[in-house]
Amino acid sequence: METRSKLYFAPSAGRNSEDIQHYLIFHIPGNPGLVTYYDPFLSTLHALLSSSSTLPSANFHIYGHSLAGFETTEQHHELAGLENQIKFVDDLLYEQVDEVRHQAGPTPKVILMGHSVGAYILLEIIRRHRTRIECGAKDFDLIGGILLFPTITHIAQSPSGMVASALLTIPRSAHIASAIVKSLTYLFPASVLYYLIRTFAGFPEHAARTTTAFIKSPIGVKESVFLGKDEMDMITNDKWGEEVWGAATEPGTNSKDTIHSNLVFFWGQNDKWVAQKTRNELIDARGFRKSKASLLAASSISDVSSPADGWKPSMFIDDQKIPHNFCIKHSEIVAEQVHTWVEEIILNHNES
């Protein structure tokens, strides 16, 4: 059973004129990094943005790609750790910016989205983008980022992280895990495995198909465990400075580029991959909130910002018990919220 390694949703027809601004929304998956887990999420987001009355002169290109090593049709011999995944995604981003420029003419403005470890990769891409600009390079306008259930600090201190850390100390854990999974599923044809996942895990069609492809892929399980070990080792302290977190940039770099952070964080209320203590400490240090109640009730960026703290990222805690793996059964509700944040990022950027 095969799945696509990339998803692309083109702008709706009928919105082509000189006044149209093109936006690339570039999505970075979590681990396991198969982008087809996010098909309903990205397609719903595309439909909502395409019908937006708030931004009638905007064309949206939505793109996502599987992380390295999670391809289901090709044999890759080298496992990719977190640093290699960052470089892989960074290269893909520039390729897609060039592709949209080739299709549409002008360089698109870019909004990044990242889920779980994809949020960590997102912040690293912002840091590298800012470094290039500060070194004098002309680059695309990166106007915002949306971080969904982010695992960006001390993942090993989370409930699931503590279990994973203990298991990943076993030598050659990636190879052992892959061998166990392959031995358990070797006798099952993909169609039978798909049926079992749908029946006993209760996964919808897209998730069952993607999980089947992941288990049957050449090195997917091995890559997932290998990357997971890197996550436990590398995702520790907050490592980013104000060039990422949103302090105003010096004039004369890129027009309006990250003048305001326009970073939006969406945290799970009881996310087993995020320690609540470290999450709350990060919100207190880097985000702005008046109180926990006002944060939970907020539905827009402006609800949790003030003129004095307007450069700080907006941070929201879910109050609907959406799980960390929202892309399995909660794609539509998250897409509706992300749709609002994308619109507000663009409006804030245009007004700055």
Image: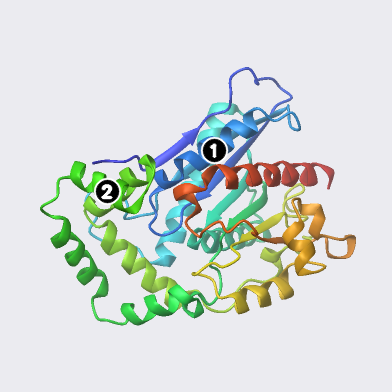
Residue 209 location, x and y as percent?
31, 43
Seen as rendered, the residue at the extreme right is: 307
Residue 329 sits above or below residue 130 on the image:
above
Q: Which residue bears the numbered disc 1?
A: 62
Residue 299 location, x and y as percent?
74, 51
Q: In which quadrant will I find the N terminus? A: top left
Residue type highlighted by circle 1: Ile
Provide the secondary structure element on which disc 1 rests. strand
Q: Residues within 10 Å of mark 2 (few under 14, many from 20)?
A: many
Residue ID at (38%, 50%): 34
Residue type highlighted by circle 2: Thr
Name the image quarter holding residue 177. bottom left
Discs 1, 2 touching: Cβ within 8 Å = no
Give whichever of 196, 167 is nearer the camera.
196
Residue 212 is labelled as 2
Residue ID at (43%, 80%): 162
Question: How far, Cα to Cα, is label 1 from label 2?
Answer: 25 Å
Task: Look at discs 1 and 2 and give the one toward the viewer.
Answer: 2
Left or right of 10 in this view: 166: left
Residue 95 location, x and y as percent?
48, 43
Left or right of 165 in this view: 261: right
**Total tally of numbered discs in the picture:** 2
Left or right of 274 in this view: 83: left
Left or right of 128 in this view: 309: right
Residue 73 in view here: no
Q: Residues within 10 Å of mark 1 (few under 14, many from 20)?
A: many
Residue 283 location, x and y as percent?
70, 71
